[in-house]
């Protein structure tokens, strides 16, 4: 069954550069800063340019380039306070938070921002962050057992009074969080995003996530990736939405864009990329079927550490817009984008690429005989009951 939704407009997000070094591990010039002033301005540029979401990254330790990091939830909250429409998704590790504490934190952020807080649940790949904090480093698939319970607790505490849940990792007894999250039409609770590639990640996402985030993929790779999530979601009677990462290089000519990609890779910080490859491929290969994220990534892919070149949003604005709509036709609902020079290129995305995307989307809907409403928002992705 096709999951493509041609009737609603694609959504766009950008990666918040809240860790140093930009989004590529390369010595090429990047006019991107990880500091708050830069990010506040970027967030305002993004919401004016038509971006609906921003995604922060969670990292506690220097690793493979990201020498300095700002904490994700506090940074996200500050960005929410600095903007008016942007939804900010804070990345969080279940192993580092109690879900009740996080549920409460996000409710407060939701009230401060009038209903714009969201989370990205990440199950962890950087073993040292856990081990050196003295936290337990669970075996790969077990991390997803905990993640699933964690998300069920969040949803339960956000939607029910006197919530109880007893499991392997969490025991919640008759708990009511007051106030509840802001009542936003079509949104039963703050949205839960989820990132992961492995079979365990896909199965878990299908059962409990509102949104599944995929690393960068070509068209076939993306199809394969969402098939696993969709199988699990269908069995659970749910309908998650799909986000795809892509590194955008938009230039006046395709040659210029390709030359920029070549320069990024030629100037890659080789020891950092190789160190990252060793760490994450070990993590990915440790899954039973070897399908963990990054398990088959090449050196070039890993220069953008979420495989963003694979999506091939590289060329002229027209070429990029066409490629984006091809992905929409196979099920992408949201593009998570990154750039060399965030402020300039996010603004340019809004003026040069987005209008073409909207035209092509309207055209694709017309050809398919589907009504397209450019102002339509996505329908709720899941029933509001906890535990579903
Ligand atoms: C869009 C996206 C964002 C992610 N953000 C983070 C992050 O901020 N911090 C982190 O430690 N892991 C992050 N991850 C990594 C995942 O949580 C997970 O560890 C990784 O996908 C490996 O899982 P797998 O081996 O099950 O595929 C992200 C993944 C994706 C797809």
Image (cartoon, rainbow, N blue to C red):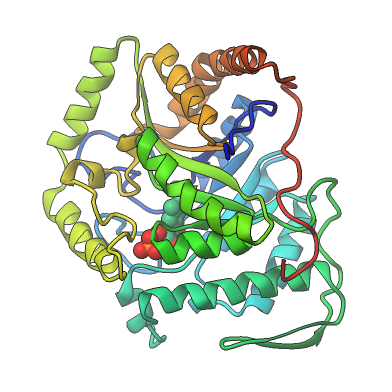
Residue 379 percent location from the top left of the image: 75, 41
Q: Can I make out residue 216 in this image? A: yes
Give the quadrant of residue 97.
Answer: bottom right
Q: Quadrant of the C terminus?
A: bottom right
Left or right, 38 with respect to 80, comes to left
Q: Residue at x 72, y 22 (%)?
A: 374
Q: Quadrant of the N terminus?
A: top right
Front residue of 86/156: it is 156
Residue 31 percent location from the top left of the image: 35, 34
Residue 121 percent location from the top left of the image: 54, 63
Left or right, 59 with respect to 53, comes to left
Front residue of 41/349: it is 349
Front residue of 369/344: it is 369
Q: Can I make out residue 121 in this image? A: no
Left or right, 333 with respect to 57, comes to right
Q: Is residue 158 above or below residue 359?
A: below
Residue 291 percent location from the top left of the image: 31, 59
Q: Is residue 100 above or below residue 351?
A: below
Front residue of 329/153: it is 329
Q: Residue at x 56, y 37 (%)?
A: 334
Q: Quadrant of ligand 1?
A: bottom left
Q: Residue at x 34, y 33 (%)?
A: 340
Q: Residue at x 49, y 28 (%)?
A: 346
Q: Is residue 115 above or below residue 130?
A: above
């Amino acid at each position: 069954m096709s999951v493509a939704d041609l009737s609603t407009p694609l959504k766009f997000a950008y990666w918040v550069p809240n860790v140093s070094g930009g989004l590529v591990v390369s010595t090429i010039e990047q006019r991107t800063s990880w500091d708050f002033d830069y990010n506040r301005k970027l967030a305002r540029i993004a919401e004016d340019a038509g971006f609906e979401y921003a995604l922060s990254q969670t990292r506690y330790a220097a690793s493979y380039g990201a020498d300095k990091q700002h904490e994700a939830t506090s940074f996200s909250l500050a960005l929410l306070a600095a903007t008016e429409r942007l939804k900010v998704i804070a990345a969080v590790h279940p192993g580092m938070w109690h879900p009740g504490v996080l549920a409460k934190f996000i409710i407060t952020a939701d009230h401060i921002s009038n209903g714009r807080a969201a989370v990205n649940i990440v199950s962890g790949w950087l073993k040292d962050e856990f081990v050196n904090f003295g936290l337990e480093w669970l075996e790969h698939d077990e991390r997803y057992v905990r993640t699933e319970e964690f998300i069920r607790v969040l949803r339960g505490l956000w939607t029910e009074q006197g919530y109880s849940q007893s499991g392997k990792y969490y025991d919640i007894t008759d708990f009511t969080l007051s106030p509840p999250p802001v009542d936003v039409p079509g949104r039963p609770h703050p949205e839960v995003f989820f990132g992961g590639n492995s079979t365990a990640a896909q199965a878990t996402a299908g059962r409990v996530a509102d949104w599944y985030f995929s690393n960068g993929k070509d068209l076939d790779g993306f199809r394969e990736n969402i098939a696993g999530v969709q199988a699990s979601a269908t069995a659970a009677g749910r309908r998650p939405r799909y986000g795809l990462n892509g590194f955008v290089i938009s230039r006046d000519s395709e040659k210029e864009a390709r030359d920029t990609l070549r320069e990024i890779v030629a100037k890659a910080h080789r020891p950092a990329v190789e160190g990252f490859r060793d760490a994450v491929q070990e993590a990915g290969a440790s899954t039973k079927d070897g399908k963990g994220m990054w398990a088959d990534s090449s050196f070039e892919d890993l220069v953008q550490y979420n495989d963003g070149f694979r999506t091939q949003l590289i060329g002229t604005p027209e070429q990029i817009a066409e490629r984006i709509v091809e992905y929409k036709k196979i099920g992408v609902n949201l593009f998570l984008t990154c750039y060399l020079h965030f402020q300039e290129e996010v603004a340019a995305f809004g003026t040069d690429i987005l209008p073409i995307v909207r035209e092509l989307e309207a055209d694709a809907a017309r050809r398919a005989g589907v009504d397209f409403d450019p102002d339509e928002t996505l329908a709720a992705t899941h029933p509001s009951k906890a535990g579903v």
